[in-house]
Amino acid sequence: MIEVRDLCKSFDGFQALHNVNITVPRGSVYGIVGPNGSGKTTLIKHMVGILIPDQGTINIEENEVYDNPEVKRRIAYIPDDIYFFPQANIKDMVNFYQRVYPDFNNERLEKLIPIFPLDFKMPIRRFSRGMKKHVAFILALCTMPDVFVLDEPMDGLDPVARRKVWSLLFQDVAEHKATVFVSSHNLRELEDVCDHVGIMHRGEVVLERSLDELQNNIFKLQMAFNGDAPDFSGLHVLAEHKVGSVIQLVVRGEREEILNKAVMLNPLMVDVLPLSLEEIFIHELGGMDYAITSAII
């Protein structure tokens, strides 16, 4: 389990993180989302022990991460901007990882080589961005970590490579109870892979729930009426839009309760539809300096 408690960090008077609290269950895939500059990468650098918190703690299985080599050996970190030694090829990096990570699994390396066919003798600096990501995942997977911390990990990968990587990560989650903490702007992809989601805004975690709970608390309500639309004050409406004779509302609440209240308005037709994670993200931030227009519904 990963626990972040009351984490604060400032840079030259700018508050990058403010009282961040996150709980990531063991064996889960946790997605952290938020607009640019919300603090996601700063949070991740604290979780892997790169940055020193001004206040608060980050623990993995009740052990603090910062300045703790034993804990760091159990973490595989893939940043958005990957760095390898300038003259290194894959063999050089494998040798380096073998010295740093005592659990480096050579047998797994042999199994991954056919999955990610790369020239082990070519300098990595000559690889494309996607190929460098392949190298990063090969090395990370071979360390046999308890925790994967991934910052925009699929950026630069083609759809086939994305599927390969997620399949391997899911294998570690299923077989070894590995935990995956991932930051991404691809909300459609996170919706397919995550079971827990946190939303960050201006250095704070404004929402943290299981994905099922999140998607069962906000819906799109479609109705049509004979004549003028009635008063919707009985519903918790986040956004409203009219398309021809159909009125679309984004509403918060339980599905059955929403449907019962909608039926009492005597519509000609009524339908309650789930929202995607991307739509939920947009509307959850609708009251936080984000101008959500009717065209987004």
Image (cartoon, rainbow, N blue to C red):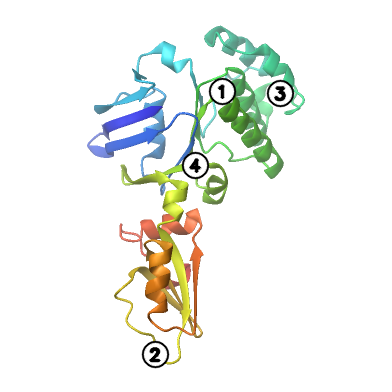
Name which residue lies at 32% across and 81% down: 231
Dot 3 corresponds to which residue? 112
User: Judging from the image, what secondary structure is the residue with disc 3 in?
Assistant: helix
Tell me the CA gap for discs 3 and 4: 26 Å
Which residue in the protein does label 2 denote? 228
Query: Contact, CB < 8 Å: mark 2 with mark 1?
Result: no
Spatial CA distance of label 3 from label 2 is 63 Å
**Label 2 packing within 10 angstroms: few (<14), some (14-19), many (20+):** few
Q: In the image, what residue type sits under mark 2?
A: Asp
Labelled pair 4, 2 in contact (Cβ < 8 Å): no
Residue 85, percent across and down?
A: 57, 18
- Tell me which numbered mark, 2 or 1, is placed earlier along the sequence: 1
Disc 1 vs disc 3: which is toward the camera? Answer: 1
Give me the C-alpha separation between circle 4 and circle 1: 17 Å
Residue at position x 36%, y 40% from top?
Answer: 39
Q: Which residue is mark 1?
A: 176
